[in-house]
Image (cartoon, rainbow, N blue to C red):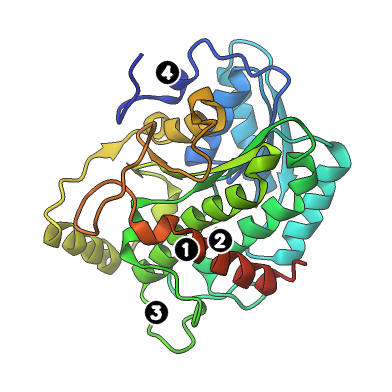
Amino acid sequence: MSLGFESTTDEVLDGVDLAGRTVLVTGASAGLGEETTRALATHGARVIMAVRDLDRGRAAAERIRAGASGAVELELGQVDLASLASVRAFADEVLGRHDRLDVLINNAGLMACPFGRTVDGHELQWGTNHLGHFLLANLLRPALLGGSSSRVVSLSSRGHAFADIDLTDPGFDRTEYTPFIGYGRAKTANALFAVGWDRRYGASGSHAYAVHPGGIHTELGRHMTADTVASLSERLRQGGRVFRWKTVPQGAATSVWAATAPELADHGGAYLEDCHVAPVTGPADDHGVLSYAIDPSRADALWDSSAEAVGLD
C-alpha cells in the first residue's frame, strides 16, 4: 500500500503486530494523542497514557476499550508539562515500573495561546511544547536505551515556518510576543530536538523523528481567537497556499508511522509528513521543512540551552 496525505493510522499499521512493545504517549486524553494510543494499543502495544487531567484520561481509555475488538493494555499517568517538578515526578513513576521503553511520542502541546508563563517562569508554548518534553525524554533515557532499539517521536508542525528559535530571548522578554511567533519557535524546537537526540543516541539504537501531522480540528486550537484565526488566514493567503484539513486518524498516521516503520531506521533525525521523509523547502511553500529546523549546529545550541533551562546535567 502506498502511504500519503489521506492514509490513516489503521492503514499504516495494517498487518503490524506490536505485542511486547511499550509506548508512552503524552496528551493521550483527546485528539491525536487518543487516536495514536488507540491505534497502537489495538495492534498489541502496551501504551502508557500521559495526561494532565486524570478524569479525561480515564474517559479516553474507556472509549478505546469500548471500541476495541479485544483486550487492550493501557496505563494511565498524570503529568503537567508546564511544571518541571511534575515532569520529574512522572518520569520517576514510569522508570519505577518499566526498565524498557520502546517508543516515546511527545504529542501534547499548545497552539497560539495568549502570553503566559509556566510554573517555572518559561514562556508557555516554549515551556510546554519544548522544554517539558525535552526534560521528559532525557529523564526517560535509561528506559529508552534499555533495549536494543527505541524511537522518540516529536510532534512538530509546518507552523515551524512562522519562526526560527531565538535563544537570545526565548521568553519574549525583549521582543514582542505574538501567538504564532511563539508557536513557530516551539515547533522549530520540536524539530531540532529530534536532530539533537539522534546525534547523541542514534548510534546506541535510539532514533528520533519530527512529525508534521497536518491540519486537524482538535483541542490544540482551543486558544484560537477570531484575531488569531484571521492572522493565520492572512499568512496562508499571502503565501498562496491551498489548505486541506485531515481527519484525526489521518493526522495521527505519520506519528504511528514514525514509531513503527522499519524503513525509517536509516533516517534518524528526519522531519516527516504524510508518511514520508519531507523535502527541504522554502517559507513560501505549503509543505516540507525549512533548513533551519534540521540544522545540526542549531540543534546542538538548542540542546545546551535547554539542558541549562531545565537543570539537566
**SS at mark 3 in the image:** loop
* x and y percentages locating residue 244 in the rendered image: 22, 40
| Horizontal side of residue 95 vs 156, given as left or right | right
* x and y percentages locating residue 180 in the rendered image: 35, 67
**SS at mark 1 in the image:** helix
- The span from disc 3 to disc 4 (Cα, nearest Å) is 40 Å
Q: If the image is split into quadrants, where does the N terminus sit?
A: top left
Identified by mark 4, the residue type is Glu
Mark sitting earlier along the chain (3/4) = 4
Residue at 45% x, 21% y: name it. 12
Identified by mark 3, the residue type is Tyr
Image mark for residue 177: 3
**Quarter-of-image position of residue 273:** top left
- The span from disc 3 to disc 1 (Cα, nearest Å) is 13 Å
**SS at mark 4 in the image:** helix
Q: What residue is disc 2 on?
A: 130
Image mark for residue 186: 1
- The span from disc 3 to disc 2 (Cα, nearest Å) is 17 Å
